[in-house]
Amino acid sequence: MSAVPATSPTSGVPHKVNPFVAVFVSLALTTLVLLVLFPNLWYEMHAISDIPTYQGYAQRLAQGDRPFTESFKVEYPPLAIPLFRLPGHVDHNKQYRHWFSVMMGVITLLTAAVTTLAACRFWPRGGRAYVAGVLFAVSVAFTGAIIINRYDAAVALLIAGFLLCLANRWYTAAAFVLGMGFALKFTPAAMLPLVLVLVGPPRRWAWPVVAFCAAAAAPFLPYLFSSPRGLWYVFHYYLARPLQVESVLGTPLLIGQLLHIHPISWASNYGSQQLVGPGASLLSNASGALMLLGLAGVYVLVWRRRARLRASTPDQAIAVLALILALMTFGKVLSPQYFIWTLPAWALVAARDRILAVVGGLTLIFTQIEFPKLYWPFLDWMTMPLLVVIARNLLLVAFFALAAWRLWGLPEAGAGEEAAAEGSAAGATRAAENEPQVVAAGDESG
């Protein structure tokens, strides 16, 4: 058999990705992290867990109490309720904790699979899809056991599903997933304008908006008319929360404490610890405006590069990551579990951006170093934990700034790319309306 000439047209063409292999690799590695690494970390696997809170809700639900009433106030949106009930064993602490952790582990594995499928759609050839699947498992290891102690893995699963919808240009489905995210933990709703930008002109917005509103409102409706005041408590709880001790906005106060410029203290309420000291109330009150400005800044960049984002689906992961980081960076509450939301987008972006991979990875690692092992020493204002939290917050700011910079630096879409993207967006809208679709997808392997 003669050798293939070096000048053969087939030489140098990347191999087609095998989605089954990519998903299997990601699932296998994530399983190893969950079953082998987590039980052998330097802290107890269920230290400082929210699972007892979830069990308390599950016990009342098992007794027939109706949630979102004046007598049974719940601070979580309605889609969280089934997650609290599913583990069963409500009267046995160890069994409930075990099965809740198993459920979150399964959800984490599903997130790994969906993230990897999105990567296979972003890059149907070459090795990036495999790299993204591996990086998701790495991100779970960097995040630590908090992923099985909170229900935020379910939020990450919805964000992964959202990214998969974007990868396939299923914009109405993407909006529906975001609506579910709103009914699960509010914050995914901030990405709805991204869907509308990708869809195209306002005349194409109807189906995505309807899909979002239906998914977002349906879980609230059973409680809306029977106990509107009890349901309003969910929103009031998040709006009224003060400046949390680990928040980025509280970093100047932490630096002041570290340098003995001015003393600060903390108080417990709303399920966490708040900062008490000069400027804490001012920063808390300013957080809403700062968060809106951060999101608006990202959307200015999205609008500036809308043609490129429509033409190149892999670049959409950068926009998703920047939006999530804006919410975290400028929010008055920054709990460690919020970093779980970033895992799908970080894995996809890190597969082709080494700097974002390193900065994001360090941010996750520093968060795990601080929580839960150093959390109580941090509240005693011990030097090392203070330095870790300050460094993590500065890394988060750098992570957000770098993601925004990458979004700013996206190249302009060519005329052919823009036309293909316009056709794909129009086709997606017609598909949602059950009209015939005759378009070609302008996806890049990027």
Image: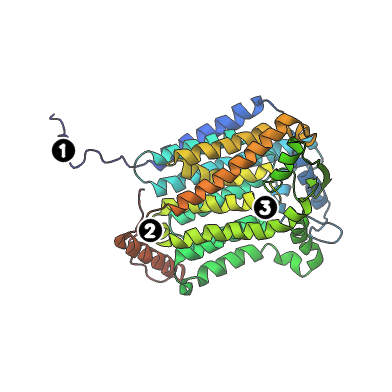
Q: Secondary structure at mark 1?
A: loop
Q: Which mark is residue 7?
A: 1
Residue drawn at x 53%, y 57% as measured from the top left: 298
**Residue 310, position in %: x, y?**
41, 60
Q: Assess disc 1: are there few (<14), some (14-19) or many (≥20) residues with their C-alpha within 10 Å of its C-alpha.
A: few
Q: Assess disc 3: are there few (<14), some (14-19) or many (≥20) residues with their C-alpha within 10 Å of its C-alpha.
A: many
Near-viewer residue (263 or 53): 263
Q: Amino acid at mark 2?
A: Ala
User: Would you name the residue on which mark 3 appears?
Assistant: 331
Rendered image quadrant of residue 262: top right
- The answer for how far apart the CA atoms under marks 3 and 1 are is 56 Å
User: Would you name the residue on which mark 2 appears?
Assistant: 311
- The answer for how far apart the CA atoms under marks 1 and 2 are is 31 Å
Near-viewer residue (340 or 325): 325
Q: Residue at the left extreme?
A: 2
Mark 1–mark 2 CB contact (< 8 Å): no
Rendered view: 71 above or below 264: below
Q: Amino acid at mark 1?
A: Thr
Residue drawn at x 45%, y 65% as measured from the top left: 199
Rendered view: 143 above or below 270: above
Image quadrant holding the N terminus, namely top left
Q: Nearer the viewer, mark 3 or mark 2?
A: 3
- The answer for how far apart the CA atoms under marks 3 and 2 are is 32 Å
Q: Secondary structure at mark 2?
A: helix
